[in-house]
Amino acid sequence: MNRSRANRRIIIVAGLGALLVIGGVTDRIGPLRWVFDHTIAPVARGFSAAGATASEAVANLSRVSSLARDNTRLEHENADLRKRLADDAETRSDNELLRKQLGLEVAGAPRQAAAEVVLFAPDSYRQFVTINKGAQAGVAVGMAVTSQGVLIGTIADVQATTARIMLVTDPEFKLAAKDQDTSATGILRGQLGNGLVLDEIGQTDTIKPGDSVTTAGLGGQIPPGILIGKVQSINTRSNVVFQSAAVETEFRVTGLRFVYVVLGL
Amino acid sequence: MRRLWAIGLVGLAVVLQLSILPALRPLGVVPNLALVGLTLVALQVVTSEALALAVLGGVILDLASGANFGLWTGIFMLVALASGMLHRAGIELEQVPVALVMVGMGTILIALVIWIGLARGTGHWSLGTWGGRLVVELVINLTLTILLRPVVRMLVGGERQAESGG
């Protein structure tokens, strides 16, 4: 091959690559995104499902040795939850009665849209997944996404038939959250390696290990009360304005397949 | 036929990079099969073809990433251009260390760009955790390079000789 011809080809392809990158950064590659959503995403969906199943199988194998211990712990937790459920049922019926007497609307369960994870972010550091529901299904930026009853992230970007979720474990994730037991509020932040931090909690607020952390519902489209995780430890120092708490979430990105987008009330 | 194999191998690596590998996360990291595949193919085919594959694979990965659009396309284009420059400089691309150095540098570069992007927006990251993750990723990627190199050479090897005259 003639070297000048080879160089010309290289320059043309490199120029095309640079144009695509500039188009992507300035968000002017809508048609390319459409093609991507209708070609690569469906192909990858099958592989993602296979990966989730394989991951689940591996996790089950590693859990066999601790099954008896987990079973005992879950039995205790189940008994505790039944008691709390009975208490909650009574509180709910009182709440509905009082709301009716005061002429207030009875709060219903939020509407949800089920979706399947089709793509994952390709690197070890950022935590994003793409789902097969988008604007056509009513999904919008900022909505909460749950899996197995736990918040896993919020919608970061929406196309017609797909949407991208920033997971709670992404280092740039931020959300107003509160201690469900004491109502102490703070900012929940993601960290590399599945842990979360509840930051900017007032020094006078009470927070203790084992408390449930839920969404605070302060502004935005995320309703309050969605479970995020449990307080693991507290970091309090007298010389700082705020205290912080390490929060443990049950959510793991490995094996993630089906999710629910909270569309609102 | 070799061109089809080159497209197929990079395409498969990219699809696996977006699906099975992040779902499995062996040892807590996502092995960079796309970088390994693209590097090994780029060392075998002519530069313009390597560059075309780099743009195609990179844009697909960028479209699936939630942040840093252009990172994958940029790194892949650098790998393709570097292979061409090394070839023109008379370096024997068939040597194992060439592939290992390129994959290693690509892995480090991707991590550094992501870290720099995150360092501006978040205060919650420890160099130990992130460095440990990078080391594990490097070991996995270099092992994959050694394991996959004979397969890629068998399927797409020989194209680079055509460029030697030009």
Image (cartoon, coloured by chain):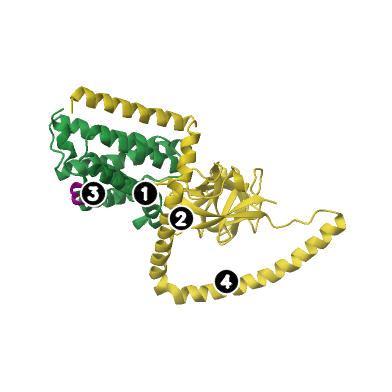
Chain colours: A yellow, B green
Q: Are marks 3 and 1 on the same chain?
A: yes
At 56% across and 47% down in the image, what residue appears? A154
Q: Position of residue A102 (x, y in %)?
A: 86, 55
Looking at the image, tell me whether mark 3 or mark 1 is earlier in sequence order. Answer: 1
How many residues crowd around disc 2 within 10 Å: few (fewer than 14), some, or many (20 or more)? many
- Which numbered disc, 1 or 2, marks the residue closer to the eye? 1
Amino acid type, label 3: Thr
Q: Which mark is residue A253?
A: 2
- Which numbered disc, 4 or 1, marks the residue closer to the eye? 1
Q: Which residue is mark 4?
A: A77
Q: Which residue is mark 3?
A: B145
Q: Which residues are magenta?
A: B149-154
Q: Are marks 4 and 3 on the same chain?
A: no
Q: Chain of mark 1?
A: B
Q: Quadrant of residue B72?
A: top left
Q: Is residue A178 left or right of residue B88?
A: right
SS type, badge 2: loop
In this rendering, does residue B32 appear at all?
A: no
Looking at this view, is B86 or A59 the one in front? B86
As for residue A27 lying within the magenta part, the answer is no
- Contact, CB < 8 Å: mark 4 with mark 1? no
Amino acid type, label 2: Val
At 64% across and 50% down in the image, what residue appears? A263
- Which numbered disc, 2 or 3, marks the residue closer to the eye? 3
SS type, badge 1: helix
Q: Position of residue B88 (x, y in %)?
A: 16, 29
Q: Quadrant of residue B93?
A: top left
Q: Chain of mark 2?
A: A
Amino acid type, label 1: Gln
